[in-house]
Amino acid sequence: MPLLEIEHLAKAYVTGEERQPVLEDVDLVLDAGETLALTGESGSGKSTLLHLVGALDGFDAGEIRLAGTPLSGLDEAGRARLRLASIGLVFQQFNLVPSLTVAQNLALQARMAGRADPDWLAELGQRLGLSRFADRYPQQLSGGQQQRVAIGRALAARPPLLLADEPTGNLDETTSDRVLELMLELVDDTGAALFLVTHSRQLAGRLDRHLHLSRGRIA
Amino acid sequence: MNGVALATLLSHWRRHPLQLFTLITGLALATGLWTAVQAINAEARASYAEAEAQLAAGRQALLVARDGTIPVDQYVTLRRAGWRVSPVLEGEVEYNGAAVTLLGIDPLTSPLARHLAPTDGEAGLDPLAARRTLFAGPATAERIRSAGTGLQVVVRDAVAPGTAIADIGLAETLLDRPGTLSHLVVLSAQPRGRPPLDAVAPGLTRIEASGAHDARRLTRSFHLNLTALGLLSFAVGLFIVQGTVGLAFEQRRGMFRTLRAIGLPARRLLAIALAELLALALLGGALGIALGYAIAAALVPDVAATLRGLYGAAVDIGLALRPGWIAAGLGMALLGTLLAAAQGLWRLRRLPVLATARAEAATRSNATTLRFQALAGLASLGLAGSVIAGLDGLVAGFVFVAGLLLGAALLLPPALAGMLALGARLARGPVAQWAWADTREQLPGLSLALMALLLALAANIGVGTMVSSFKQTFTGWLDQRLVSELYVTAETDAQGQAIHDWLEPRVDAVLPIRHADTRIDGRPAAIYGIVDHETYRRHWPLLASAPRVWDRVATAEGALINEQFARRAGLAPGDALPLAPGWRLPVVGVYSDYGNPDRQVIVALDALLERFPGVANRQFGVRVAPDRVETLAAGLRDRFGLPARSVIDQAAVKAHSLAIFDKTFLVTGALNVLTLGVAGFAILTSLLTLWTMRLPRLAPLWALGLTRPRLAAMELLRSVALAGLTFLLALPLGLSLAWALLAIINVEAFGWRLPMFLFPGDWLTLGALALLAAALAAALPAWRLYRTPPAELLEVFADER
């Protein structure tokens, strides 16, 4: 059974009386441990698709199934439980908690999910090059370091699916390469599937599969 | 999960200790001021309750003589005729310079005796053993003991402050009034078939029991006033809490979204945020209660002075931690925090996990909010106006004040926005235009603190105008009332007569001050007798009078009454006034009589002596050329061996009266200062908490070429300008408040109406204080801006979100 199945997915934003379709009839399958890059122009709907897969937003039609669980049947609390247990999220803006230290940010989701493994957390910190900064706060780190904390946090609970929205969008080319390298290594080690949204075709080329979204449809 | 989420939320405060300090301080100040007022009220009421036990005799009918004294023979006659009455001798004794009311009672029959009964082997009013014993409350007992009288003093909490109770035999000796009684208490069980009072004792009058406790009734409005001031302070404190909590929610929006994104359900997040708030409220509330206790302890002496000065209520307020006001304080802290955080919690509940912070922030400062505030403010003012137009009384007065303050507070942001828009339109040059526009943009974040400042300033202007008007009127009234150059008090009637005879050929006039204490319509009243003299005709402060008022008083064809009597009994010149059985006079004038809680009547001295022949003749006002006062006073002291306090010149009496007046309003002044301090603190906290949001606004200006010192100076100027505009709007509000206090609330509370005077000098001082507070509040953020390294300003461009 595939880890992620998307069937005939549709989503539109309504502004006043105007209805603006963002996704139309999207079908997609992602297997466990597979890495998939989704590219597309600005406004093509790729971030929206990632948000829907991450159970962050509701859709209008179609279905998304994660490990066989249909998202349309989940209420708000059910979607939150699913995110906590099965999904790791990495955003372009890092979204770290500024008042928690690096170590605390790293362990946050795992601790909330009740799956904090000190050995794994220590290994994550070491492999991400964060051990030296464990007691620092996010604003004391560079962009690349902050993104590494975000990746560590997303993988700390060993979720089966990692969603990344332009994770290197705020980083320079060298840092970007290093961060992606680390992310792919960790995804490989944990056996998680990766669904990555990016502008960069070069970046997309380094993943198992590459899809292009154009005007709300998979090209 | 809950623990981790709560710890994450709390981590915000660890990184923002100043904000936490602000929140806790705001809560503690709000709860503290409220609790202090509650504690003072609760303790004062408890003091009345204790006094009530002693005053229980006042609830029984009394027999009194017209001249104030009853011979013992008359008491014996009544007892032999079957009347069950208990004798009381009442008078004043001085211990260590303070007067103590001494009540001499018969231990076998007096209803008071049960309060003095021996307990646990201690001394009580034993008929056989108590001939040398006085019973008094703790403070009075201490005073008597320290005077070294040699008498045994037993403490009984039930005895009212300033009073001592003794066996009547001892009282006769101490008061030097052998063989006389002040009144007789009619005991509850009377035998049937006893002869009527007129037949046995024709000179005595029966006075029925009064229904209510005067101190409790009279001071109710004072406590209501204090409660209103306490509530105002609480509201001002809550502005701080709301500002801080609102900012904490705003700053943690990203944290909330992250927590939601990684799997914390919205309801759980809301519940945890609520738990965090309640924990902080409990902490702030507990500190507030401790603070309130300290404030109450500091204010209690002033409150006792106020109660004595305004109402004549003798209270001996101690301060104890009572579960009632502790629970009320914590309850108010919790309720206030929930109220202050309601908007933040509501937004948190509806926070979309994917919404951007910028879009949220933009919706808050739109014109719709200002329009809504303006409409709500106008509605509140309309309600206040219609209440005062349609209803009378204390409650209507307070509703008017509340509606006025709320309406004005709501109208403040739209009014300021209008002024700032006008400023922007008139501004020349891009920097000035930016400054006006930027100030307007800051308004939503500062409006709560400015509302707090508006309320505090208005309360200061209102209460200050009331007190100053009162003082000015009171001083003028003292000048009218205290015309005699010298006031003399003799120790006995015989000495009084001797002094009168000695003075008469040596001075311009000797004006006897003689009065009888009685009851009119069952309420305590004093009837004063005066001689006809130019002093009264020229100086007496009449508020209303009939034609030939002084001629009619002199010929015993009319009586003057004080203002509080006129208002409470609904009397005016021309109305008939029953003074005693068979004695009725028309009211011919009403005079102001500030500071006296009781009813007072003035009649011709001869008419008074005809009805009350035995009234004391010991006090005189002496008219004499001012340059002879000192010599005359020395002569009086030498010749009659009078102590210094018995011969007082006019200036000393005035100084003493004004000192009492100032002490009376100390508590109001103290609460006012505290409220203004809290408002100043609110501005400081708003500016400090807005600080992080200011950098992104200021950094582009800095990049364009404005120096950091100039930007810092503009920040300072902005704060001062907003405080100045707020002060301008607070002036009419404060004056409206003063009018309501003088024309509505004080008439109900004290029984007299005062003219309103304006004190522009006080306003200027207050305005300068407000500007200083705003400047001080802005100084720290401005200093931080001045010291901000360029690298930090550059981060705004490097890390724009």
Image (cartoon, rainbow, N blue to C red):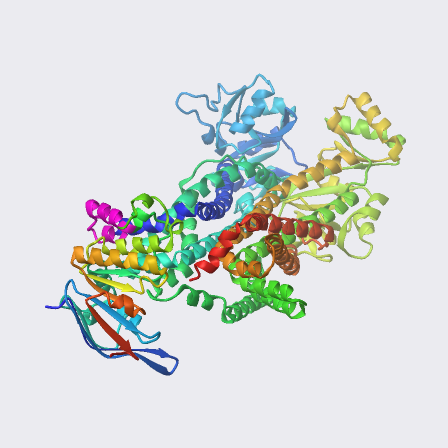
In percent of the image, x 48 and y 24: which residue is there? B125
In percent of the image, x 33 and y 57: which residue is there? A175
In percent of the image, x 46 and y 31: which residue is there? B115
In the image, is residue A113 part of the stretch drawn in magenta? yes
Question: Front-most of B228 and B685?
Answer: B685
Residue B741 % position (x, y): 63, 55
Residue B407 % position (x, y): 56, 64
Q: Residue furthest left?
A: A1
Horizontally, is B715 left or right of B43 in the view?
right
Horizontally, is B467 left or right of B152 in the view?
right
Question: Front-most of B786 and B126?
Answer: B786
How many marks can you see? 0
Q: Is residue B583 visible?
A: no
Is B642 situated above or below A117? above
Is B265 situated above or below B145? below
Horizontally, is B718 left or right of B688 in the view?
right
Quarter that holds the C terminus of chain B? bottom left
In the image, is residue B562 part of the stretch drawn in magenta? no
Residue B696 % position (x, y): 50, 59
Q: Residue furthest top?
A: B150
Q: Which residues lie in the magenta part?
A: A106-127
Horizontally, is A141 left or right of B648 in the view?
left
Q: Is residue B352 visible?
A: yes
Assign the magenta stretch its main secondary structure: helix
Residue B235 % position (x, y): 51, 53
